Image (cartoon, helix red, strand yellow):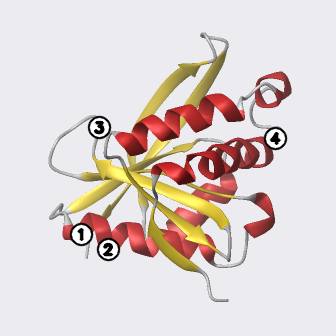
Amino acid sequence: MTARVRPATVEDAGAIGEIHVRSWQAAYDGLLPADFLAGISVGNRTAGWARTLRDGGRVLVVEDPDVVGFAAFGPRRDEPGEGELYAIYLRPEAWSRGLGRLLHEEVLASLTESGWPAAVLWVLATNERAKTFYERAGWALDGGTRTETIAGGTVSLEELRFRRPLP
């Protein structure tokens, strides 16, 4: 079976929640505190994604043949007039098989259809794998930085902003 991308439904929330946790635990191993990564709750992530999907959030999933990844996107959260890629995550065993590129292409098409001239995304400053992925896909650092604090203020995320024009 060939992988396919489709819009996510509320019924996909469990798979998305699990993928979100497993991918964070693998991708951020050594980049974020181990106790924080071990404590991420699939149940909490599933509930959050169910709310997002019920509220009309724009999320795509890739099936190969089961759901192995997802991407979330929409309007830029900090400034109007552009799109934003909020997240792309795959099950670790699905990495390096072209599925991230497939999801990425579908997100770009959807953002373009929305009429935005450009889009942004944020990447953990120390996540070399993600930075390389996005640079190869035509994104470039634009000088934006931010620090997000999560886990009740115990974990800081230093992030870099990438931007690209939309086709």
Read off the residue under disc 1.
112
Residue 137 appears in the rendering: no
Three-letter amino acid code at the position of disc 3: Arg
Residue 17 locus on image (x, y percent):
63, 43
Near-viewer residue (20 or 160): 20
Who comes first in sequence, dot 4 or dot 3?
4
- State the mark number for residue 166: none
Read off the residue under disc 4.
29
Q: Nearer the viewer, mark 2 or mark 4?
A: 2
CA–CA distance in space, label 3 to label 1: 17 Å
The local crowd at label 1, few if under 14, some if 14 to 19, many if 20 or more residues have their Cα within 10 Å, is: some
Residue 24 locus on image (x, y percent):
71, 43
Q: Quadrant of the C terminus?
A: bottom left
The local crowd at label 4, few if under 14, some if 14 to 19, many if 20 or more residues have their Cα within 10 Å, is: few
Cβ–Cβ under 8 Å for marks 1 and 2:
yes
Q: Label 4's element?
A: loop
Read off the residue under disc 2.
109
- State the mark number for residue 77: 3
CA–CA distance in space, label 4 to label 3: 27 Å
Residue at the spot 75% in from the left edge and 46% down from the top edge: 22
Cβ–Cβ under 8 Å for marks 1 and 4:
no
Who comes first in sequence, dot 1 or dot 4?
4
The local crowd at label 2, few if under 14, some if 14 to 19, many if 20 or more residues have their Cα within 10 Å, is: few
